[in-house]
């Protein structure tokens, strides 16, 4: 990189000759020369934009100095400016720069570059580089080069935190492995953790703990010296002399029971290695989560542990706490009002009822301390006395409350909050006393947040705002994870939450009910922000949570879907709301974050739009959650989920099928081609078969000797074993195991009601159950669909056209369930509520059928040359350029809108919702309506039947 060093050296020389440090007049000139030094022709030629417009909170427009998506945001300040004071502005700009949000942020005052990576490290730069050092230390800005390299940072606190957590977790695991009681090992580890932090953040003399460990050359000394230090830290006053001279009183409840252990040599070495770290660089807000992931592990795995990024946590802390307070602080017109806000801040209470190791509360504490500092700055504008000389201390750790069922997590949360106090003092340069620590035993509760030990609802501490990340657990996983007794007890205690709601919904509903009302007299209270499963905006989960919240509250900011940094392969939704519908207490517009169209190699990118309203589906369109199920759609049933095998033994390869049929030719009658979602989308050969006895009893099944002996050998033993292993504590067989064992030769869910409907048809419609976009195909009725297929009992081209059209697609997206970034088709939510055209003419019906046939013709023709099946084919619709398939879909959509009588310019979902209500009202009044399928008025429905379909293999 000698060439880069030379170019940057020339840049430094040029700056000395031409730059005075004027932010307004010289920023673009400076940045253009910097880009040229990094190998570009200039900043514009690189694709960067100067003075990029950014919408501000409450209206108005700000201008970012330089934005180069998705690489960097650079904010320039005048020479000599304190860059730490501009962190908040840079973070706010970065938050709004979507889609394609830059990975890095640089603050520069012409002499220094402060580099931030907000995704991993929010409140401190990952590196600082002076202009003079740039030629030989350009690693932190490596992303600026025309041929970018991985940047090298000197203050990567995530890496340091992972290493530190790894060592301390290994110590805890070693103690437990050799038989130290778990609670003793826990106390020793947490007390040591506080000492490690204390000597590096100024609560103990520098190297005090490290030197103490060096003196622990025997197990007895380790017992006496380390245990003695813990005792002194629990003794009021400052130790006057002796080995522990100068040790102050820590209190905080942490050292109430000093842990004394005779450490082994290996255990002492682990503690010594931990003491070699600079613990002032360890991030408390992520340490606890990483540490917990490593506890009890056979092998260390802190490097693979996921933690919730501070930037993700700010998606709740910002709208729920920071922005309401900031509005009050910046809007204060008098000294009296500012002093009232200080007094309110002193009693402001924040609750996290699923606090884990305290990361949400830590960041909330940090932000409230910054808001407190801002109040003092504002007071300085009014008061003659210098605000900086006023004593701080209105916000303390006692303002924060947490609950969690994991005892160790709660103890970690207490330590995290104790550390937050000293770190805030250092950041804000205030005159509060760091010791003694706040005793938080009454603030943090160990236990179930839903059920108390006496079986009643668990009491929650009073709170002004509630934040957090309740457990991600779907309704179907509740009993396997927690047992039937617990789940039934929760459902009895909370009858207002539907039984099929996800676990986190109980926190949403309880939080809303627990909040005070957000009122004009106290506009910062009565607010909440929680992370939930994607299902919180769908079906029973929406009814139990967000529907109730929106009945007397308002969602002010939401994320409809994003991957969650705290767990692998999990997508979440986020809702921030106020318990009021008073417009005077709410922002003029709401912010709705959503998945942006994919760009380049980035898997997931968020975009944001300002909207007038966010509904209980976390969308800004029609409130389709209120759509009624239509009896004309459900009776008779036409939409089904496919067969769930329950055991892989029912699925046969061609060779297995051939062997069974060779032994017993009659068995061919009950072996059928099998279709799953992947086959339907990729065009894979149907080379698998399902063995299905349907509803035959044991004697009838035994008549098919080849198939019967197969399931007897391959399925019966497993079902007997699972029934035995699944017995409850009292030896009783669980009901579902008992039912499966009683009919062990049958599929777990063979869907006889579906088979009775599709067997008489020449073909049926289907699509993948989980999909980004439903792509409909016809399948021969001889083919058995898997549970990953959604089946529609229609054989006609008109029904194909309706279901493949944009109206059905948009209804599907608005109403369906979510799985990560994909959608799940739900008959109850989507099909049962979807209104079909009520008065289409014969010509309109024929036009829809013809448009559907044209789509299938184009698809079939294209698949002769395009490999990868329909999935690949439909991905071409996301690309620019003329596309016959896109044109065919547009023609179909026009035909369908005409049949509905809808306007292409009006809100399609609202028009469908209005029609749903009309049809529901007509059904209730006993009037005739048009059900799904070919309308009865069509004179020749047979003309709408063609024979193209996915057929059985030869």
Image (cartoon, rainbow, N blue to C red):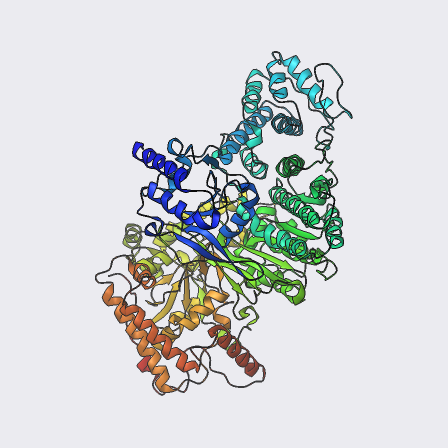
Q: Residue furthest left?
A: 865
Q: How many marks?
A: 0
Question: Can residue 662 be seen at all in this image of the molecule?
Answer: yes
Of 498 and 516, nearer the camera is 516
Q: Residue furthest top?
A: 218
> Which quarter of the picture shows residue 857?
bottom left
> Which quarter of the picture shows residue 135?
top left
Quadrant of the rendering where the C terminus is positioned: bottom left
Task: Kindly identify the residue that appears in the image at 57 percent across and 46 percent down.
Answer: 481
Of 734 and 278, nearer the camera is 278
Of 936 and 450, nearer the camera is 450
Q: Residue furthest right?
A: 236
Task: Relative to 167, say whether 71 is above or below.
Answer: below
Task: Kindly identify the residue that appears in the image at 59 percent across and 27 percent down.
Answer: 172
Q: What percent of the width, then of the height, locates residue 326?
A: 64, 53
Q: What percent of the width, then of the height, locates residue 934?
A: 39, 80
Quadrant of the rendering where the N terminus is positioned: top left
Q: What percent of the width, then of the height, locates residue 324?
A: 65, 56
Of 586 and 810, nearer the camera is 586
Task: Relative to 91, say whether 125 is above or below.
Answer: above
Q: What percent of the width, then of the height, locates residue 272?
A: 56, 20
Residue 496 as seen in the image, left or right of residue 34: right
């Amino acid at each position: 990189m000698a060439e880069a060093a030379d170019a940057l050296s020339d840049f430094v020389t040029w700056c000395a000759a031409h730059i005075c440090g004027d932010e307004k007049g010289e920023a673009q000139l400076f940045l253009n020369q910097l880009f040229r030094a990094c190998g570009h022709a200039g900043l514009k030629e690189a694709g960067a934009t100067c003075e990029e417009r950014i919408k501000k909170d409450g209206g108005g427009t700000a201008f970012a100095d330089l934005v180069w998506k998705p690489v960097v945001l650079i904010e320039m300040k005048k020479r000599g400016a304190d860059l730490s004071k501009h962190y908040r502005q840079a973070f706010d700009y970065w938050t709004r720069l979507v889609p394609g949000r830059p990975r890095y942020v640089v603050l520069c005052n012409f002499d220094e570059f402060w580099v931030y990576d907000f995704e991993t490290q929010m409140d401190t730069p990952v590196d600082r580089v002076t202009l003079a050092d740039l030629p030989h230390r350009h690693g932190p800005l490596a992303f600026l080069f025309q041929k970018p390299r991985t940047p090298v940072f000197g203050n990567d606190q995530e890496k340091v935190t992972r290493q530190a957590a790894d060592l301390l977790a290994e110590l805890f695991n070693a103690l437990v492995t050799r038989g130290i009681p778990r609670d003793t090992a826990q106390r020793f580890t947490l007390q040591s953790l506080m000492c490690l932090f204390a000597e590096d953040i100024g609560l103990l003399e520098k190297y005090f703990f490290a030197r103490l460990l060096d003196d622990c050359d025997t197990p007895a000394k380790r017992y006496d010296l380390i245990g003695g230090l813990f005792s002194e830290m629990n003794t009021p006053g400052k130790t006057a002399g002796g080995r522990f001279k100068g040790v102050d009183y820590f209190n905080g409840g942490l050292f109430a029971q000093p842990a004394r252990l005779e450490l082994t040599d290996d255990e002492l070495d682990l503690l010594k290695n931990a003491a070699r770290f600079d613990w002032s660089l360890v991030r408390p807000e992520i340490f606890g989560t990483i540490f917990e992931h490593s506890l009890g592990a056979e092998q260390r795995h802190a490097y693979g542990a996921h933690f919730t990024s501070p930037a993700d946590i700010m998606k709740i802390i910002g709208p729920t706490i920071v922005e309401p307070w900031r509005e009050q602080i910046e809007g204060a017109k008098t000294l009296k009002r500012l002093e009232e806000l200080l007094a309110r801040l002193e009693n402001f209470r924040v609750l996290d009822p699923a606090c884990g190791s305290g990361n949400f509360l830590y960041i909330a504490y940090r932000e409230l301390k910054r808001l407190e500092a801002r109040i003092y700055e504002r007071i300085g504008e009014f008061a003659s006395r210098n605000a900086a000389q006023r004593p701080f201390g209105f916000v303390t750790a006692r303002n924060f409350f947490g609950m969690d069922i994991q005892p160790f997590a709660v103890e970690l949360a207490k330590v995290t909050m104790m550390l937050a106090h000293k770190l805030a003092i250092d950041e804000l340069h205030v005159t509060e006393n760091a010791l003694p620590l706040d005793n938080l035993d009454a603030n943090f509760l160990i236990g179930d947040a839903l059920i108390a030990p006496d079986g009643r609802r668990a009491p929650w501490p009073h709170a002004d705002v509630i934040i957090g990340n309740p457990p991600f657990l779907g309704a179907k996983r509740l009993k396997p994870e927690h047992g039937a007794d617990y789940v039934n007890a929760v459902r009895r205690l909370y009858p207002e939450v539907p039984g099929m709601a996800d676990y986190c919904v109980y926190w949403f509903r309880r939080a809303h009910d627990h909040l005070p009302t957000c009122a004009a007299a106290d506009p910062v209270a009565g607010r909440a922000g929680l992370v939930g499963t994607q299902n919180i905006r769908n079906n029973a989960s929406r009814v139990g949570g967000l529907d109730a919240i929106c009945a007397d509250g308002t969602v002010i900011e939401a994320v409809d879907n994003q991957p969650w940094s705290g767990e692998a392969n999990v997508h979440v939704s986020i809702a921030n709301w106020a318990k009021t519908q008073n417009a005077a207490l709410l922002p003029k517009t709401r912010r709705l974050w959503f998945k942006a169209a994919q760009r380049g190699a980035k898997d997931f990118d968020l975009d944001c739009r300002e909207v007038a309203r966010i509904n209980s589906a976390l969308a800004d369109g029609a409130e389709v959650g209120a759509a009624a199920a239509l009896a004309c759609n459900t009776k008779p049933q036409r939409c089904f989920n496919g067969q769930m095998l329950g055991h892989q033994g029912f699925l046969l390869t061609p060779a297995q099928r051939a062997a069974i049929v060779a032994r017993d030719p009659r068995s061919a009658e009950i072996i059928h081609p099998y279709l799953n979602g992947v086959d339907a989308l990729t065009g894979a050969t149907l080379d698998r078969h399902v063995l299905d006895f349907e509803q035959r009893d044991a004697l009838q099944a035994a008549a098919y000797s080849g198939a019967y002996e197969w399931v007897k050998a391959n399925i019966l033993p497993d079902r007997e074993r699972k029934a035995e292993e699944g017995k409850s504590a009292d030896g009783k067989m669980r009901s579902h195991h008992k039912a499966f064992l009683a009919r062990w030769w049958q599929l777990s869910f063979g869907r006889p009601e579906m088979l009775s409907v599709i067997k008489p048809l020449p073909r049926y419609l289907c699509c993948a159950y989980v999909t980004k976009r439903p792509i409909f195909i016809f399948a021969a009725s001889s083919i058995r669909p898997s549970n990953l297929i959604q089946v529609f009992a229609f054989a006609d081209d008109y029904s194909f056209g309706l279901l493949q059209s944009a109206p059905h697609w948009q209804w599907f997206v608005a109403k369906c369930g979510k799985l990560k970034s994909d959608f799940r088709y739900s008959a109850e939510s989507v099909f049962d509520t979807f209104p079909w055209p009520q008065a289409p003419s014969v010509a309109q019906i024929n036009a829809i059928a013809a448009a559907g046939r044209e789509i299938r013709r184009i698809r079939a023709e294209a698949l002769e040359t395009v490999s990868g099946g329909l999935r690949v084919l439909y991905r071409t619709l996301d690309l620019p350029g003329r596309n016959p398939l896109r044109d065919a879909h547009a023609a179909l959509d026009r035909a369908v809108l005409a049949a509905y009588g809808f306007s292409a310019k009006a809100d399609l979902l609202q028009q469908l919702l209005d029609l749903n209500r009309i049809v529901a009202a007509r059904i209730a009044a006993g009037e005739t309506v048009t059900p799904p399928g070919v309308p009865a008025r069509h004179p020749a429905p047979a003309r709408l039947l063609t024979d193209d379909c996915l057929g059985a293999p030869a």
